[in-house]
Image (cartoon, rainbow, N blue to C red):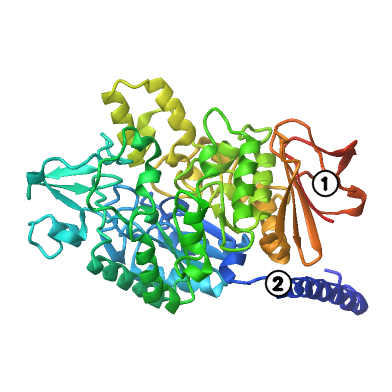
Amino acid sequence: MKRLPLQFVVVICILVITGLACRAQTNANMNDNVDRKWWKEAVVYQIYPRSFKDANGDGIGDLKGIISELDYIKSLGVTAVWLNPIYSSPNDDNGYDVSDYRNIMKDFGTMADFDELLKGLHQRNIKLVMDLVVNHSSDEHEWFKQSRSSRTNPYRDYYHWWNADRGKPAPRYSLFDVNHDAWRYDSLTNAYYLHYFSRKQPDLNWENSKVRQEVFDIMKFWADKGIDGFRLDAFQFAAKDTTFPVFPVGYEKDFTKYYAMGPHLHDYLKEMYNEVLSKYDVMSVAEGAGNSFEDAHNLVDADRHELNMAYAFDAVDIAKLEGYSLVHLKEIFSKWDNQFADKGWLSVFLANHDQARLVSRFGNDAPAFRELSSKMLTTFIMTMRGTPYYYNGDELGMTNAGFTKIEDYRDVAALNEYKHQENTGGDMQAFMKRLAFESRDNSRTPFQWDGSDHAGFTTGTPWIKVSNNYKTINEAEQDKDPNSVLNYFRQVVRLRKDNLVLVYGKYTLLDKDNPNVYAYTRELNGKKMLILLNFSPKNATANVDVDMNNTRGLLSNYKDKGIYKVKGGVSLRPYEALVCEM
């Protein structure tokens, strides 16, 4: 191989170092006016362990599988991993029913495997956020076994019981129960126990100080191991009015209004902060953000001493089988940003393990538009103010599974709802069509590593079917294609990390009534960026009063990266995304 002359090497090195120094100086100059925190600047990559990579051939993803792909995770540029539950569990709800909070599920490996995973992540400067499931436990947890054994057992009040001598309790809606009844009768002590989710997920009684101390000790156990954060599953539901009053007829249609932000929830979070969170350099985020902006601020404003960031579902919930309104999406994100412009911090996301695939819900998974719309959505998530959360597989543009039979599904929510629809004379054809679009199992199919059997996920039989398109949508093919969805994801992550304006900068919505284009600027300390996103499969015009001659294109999801000006704005091709410096 021919070597470059020394003088050229020196020049190249100077240019590279100068470029890095300029970027560092640009970010350094922005420090004065922002409250910098690692968790604000993080790019969080969510891993669903059961479906990520199987190392032992049993068809179930495991910790050693994740360990084997740590270099891949590092290559993405992400700075934190949110790991779905890996604790011991009978798996009624894929690990969200915990039977032992201090042990690892056998399907996933051992505590030694976990320690190796944590070490490997930290060696690559990636932080680890654990999913803490403490609104409820498994009915196979020792606490519950003791609790149900007798009315006088010391663990009785670890859960919510209603003695049948008092008659039936006021109805409560269960999300996963086949009858949607959250009270389950237990003949052993002639009493009902409460379960907002499945029958095997009894709700913990946070009103009991012993329960709270148990949870704080569990958190300390993991924090002492060196983890970097907690995501509190379903925690907005943890506090209950234990008189269990009757709710209005139809309350189940908006159950969050009645379940979320119960009495003393803030007291419990302040206690958690004082006992645990304030004593470690960890981030904290709870699933859900209450029923109002005030609720959200009360959860996460720094002077409240509770949690770090809000995780609101307003936007992710609008995608339906019939479609969604971009104007509505813009309204939601803009309202949340406006409310948190000066205080508090937000999570930015459009997908997770409880939603169907990002591109199938908010983009267009037809072959002609899947890549473009995946890239466009990535651009959106990575250029909004807040901490971006990105679900594994979406960086490839993985799609919904295309399941057509109930036998294809594994999710307890889907299976029990199918039985409920059958038992109540529901329209099964309509139900199956809706399920194919919105089922959580869409996001839980195995990660598509390559074009070999089972997409390279396992040498055994996968616990759930692999999507049929794995031969054309997989990591191996995309890694070597510079124009792939995967490599575009890496570019956008790098752009965000190099430009604090995309993390902390002021957000200003442009062309707000445009039904096809999402346009906005980000601005911080004299640096300003313009983001133009076409959310439609046709040409569209961004009606922005900007002289594009005075902008510098930083990123485009089209190969030619062209900008086409028209009278009164900028012409965008189908699903085109542009990021420009102004």
Per the image, the residue denoted by label 1 is: 561
The residue that appears at 28% across and 71% down in the rendered structure is: 213
Left or right, residue 271 beside residue 9: left
Can residue 480 be seen from the camera position used here?
no
Nearest to the observer: residue 124 or residue 315: 315
Residue 281, image x, y percentages: 49, 76
Q: Residue at x 35, y 65 (%)?
A: 268
User: Which badge, 1 or 2, comes first in the chain's sequence?
Assistant: 2
The reply to whether residue 14 is visible in this rendering is: yes
Question: Element type at marker 1?
Answer: loop
Q: Quadrant of residue 277?
A: bottom left
Judge the density around disc 1: few (<14), some (14-19), many (≥20) Cα neighbours within 10 Å. Answer: some
Q: Give the residue type at disc 2.
A: Asn
Q: What is the x, y in percent for residue 276?
A: 39, 74
Q: Amino acid at mark 1?
A: Lys
- Which residue lies at the image location 47% right of the left edge and 50% below the top edge? 457
Q: Which residue is mark 2?
A: 33
